[in-house]
Structures are given as structure tokens and as C-alpha cells.
Amino acid sequence: MPRRFPPPLPSNGHAMQRLMGRYRWWALELWSLLGLTSEFFKGFWKLHYLGPCVTVFGSARFPQGHRYYELARQVGQELAAAGFTTMTGGGPGIMEAANRGAKEAGGLSVGCNIHLPREQAPNPYLDRWVTIDRFYVRKVLLTRYSYAFVVLPGGFGTFDELFEVLTLIQTGKVSDFPMVLMPSDFWAPLVAMARDTMVANGTISEQDAEHLLVMDSPQEAVAHIRRTALEKYGLSYGTLRRRWFGGQ
């Protein structure tokens, strides 16, 4: 008797929903694998030779003039002045602000955008960007090229990116790159939970909690990132072109 499979879950036609539709013919699984490979290839092709990046995470929902938008803009300016490429998710809000600041300061501004029904379109301050379908491809690209991460206020997506990177650092899948959370008033409850509850219950170690570095000053945050890049990761700085070279 032929084997019967349950019907697939409803899908709106999006690549991610099709992939998560449970049981499918093996040929469709192969087709999804080819699509995944092509997205990685497209991302690697477009984002190679960027130079050392710093990825800025944050919400798409803060407009120009909001204090978090202006804070991200200052972060982008400071990163550009220090010679880093500023990478974001490429959308509006915090992402736009960081890219805008980098552009205004003469730095390289890069985005890793994603197809979404709303909120997400490439912002106008990008020198280079790639647009993809799958969140997990996007997260790999946002992590792959960066020597540090600056996390500004956001929602579920920002928290997902934050904890993804923290897990990679905790498990040794990536180096313990600086993870700067800004500003302190937004992140204070999370840091308190990590240090007072999670460490106390043994779900993370004190060393894990130390990866949550909270700052309020963009200048101090970028100075810390720059110092770590020089001392820990062996980057050298080209003063004539204001660009980083070399490194591990």
C-alpha cells in the first residue's frame, strides 16, 4: 500500500512558508536547497570585499527625529570616522539612521535587506545592498562580516538577532566580538534579568552575562570597538584612506 502523508500546511506562497510546509516531495526539498544555496551565493558575492564591518541592529519603526533614530545616526557617523563599514538590515528606522550617519561621514554603508509584506524596503542611504527571502540567510550575512555588533532598541526581530549572536559567541561558533547595547535605560531590565536571574539560576555563566556591554555614548562605544579590533583581532589602520586592512 502506498505511504500516505498529511496534507501540507497552508501557505501564502512565500519561500519560507513553502519550506516549513512539513511533508513535501523530495524534488521540492531539493529545489528549496538550491534556492537556499543561491541566496547564500548572492549574499557572499555582493558583500565580499567590504572590509571589516560593524553590524547595527534595531527597530524599523522609529522615525527621523526620535531619540533612538538620532542615536543610531551618531553611531553610524562614529563608525565611519573610525574606518568601519556600517552594516544593517537595510530597512527604515534604526537601520536607516545608522546607514545615513555612515553615509554623511563619508563611510561605506551596506544593507542586508529582506522581502517582507510591510516595513522593509532598502533605505536611500546604502552604497551596496542585497535583498533576500530567508531570515536565516540574512542573519548569517549580518554576522559573517562583522567585528562587533551595536544593538539599539527594537522588537522581536532585534531580540532574535541579539540572542542569535550571543548564542554563537557562547558556544564558540564565532569569536567573542564586542556586543554593545545602547542606550542603557532601554536595556537595563534585560541586563538585570541576565545577571540577577539567569546567572543566579545557572542557565548562563557570569562570563556569558559580561558579553552584554551597555553604553550611552556613541563615541565611547566605537572607541571600545576600535580598541578591541586593534588589540584583539590584529587589524591595522590605513590612515591615508581611513580604512581598515588585514586582520584574522
Image: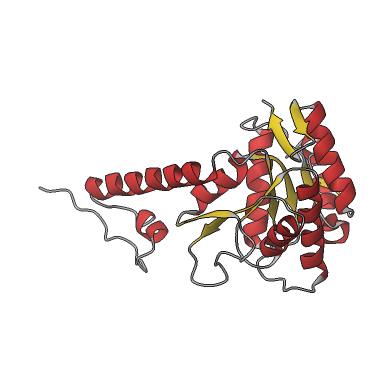
Above or below for 164 versus 185: above
Horizontal and vertical percent position of residue 94: 71, 63
Q: Quadrant of residue 230?
A: top right
Viewer-closest of 128 and 32: 128
Q: Residue at x 53, y 50 (%)?
A: 138
Report whether 76 appears left or right of 184: left
Question: Looking at this view, is 150 or 15 the one in front?
Answer: 150
* Location of residue 206 with respect to 56 vertically, above or below: above
Q: Quadrant of the C terminus?
A: top right
* 94 to the left or right of 35: right
Residue 210 visible (yes or no): no
Q: Residue furthest left?
A: 1
Q: Can residue 1 be seen here?
A: yes
- Looking at the picture, the colour scheme in use is secondary structure
Q: Is residue 5 left or right of residue 83?
A: left
Residue 102 lies in quadrant: bottom right
Residue 44, image x, y percentages: 49, 41
Q: Say which residue appears at 69% left-offset and 58% top-offset.
A: 99
- Measured as percent of width and height from the top left, residue 186 is found at 82, 61
Tell me the residue at 67%/64% (across/down): 96
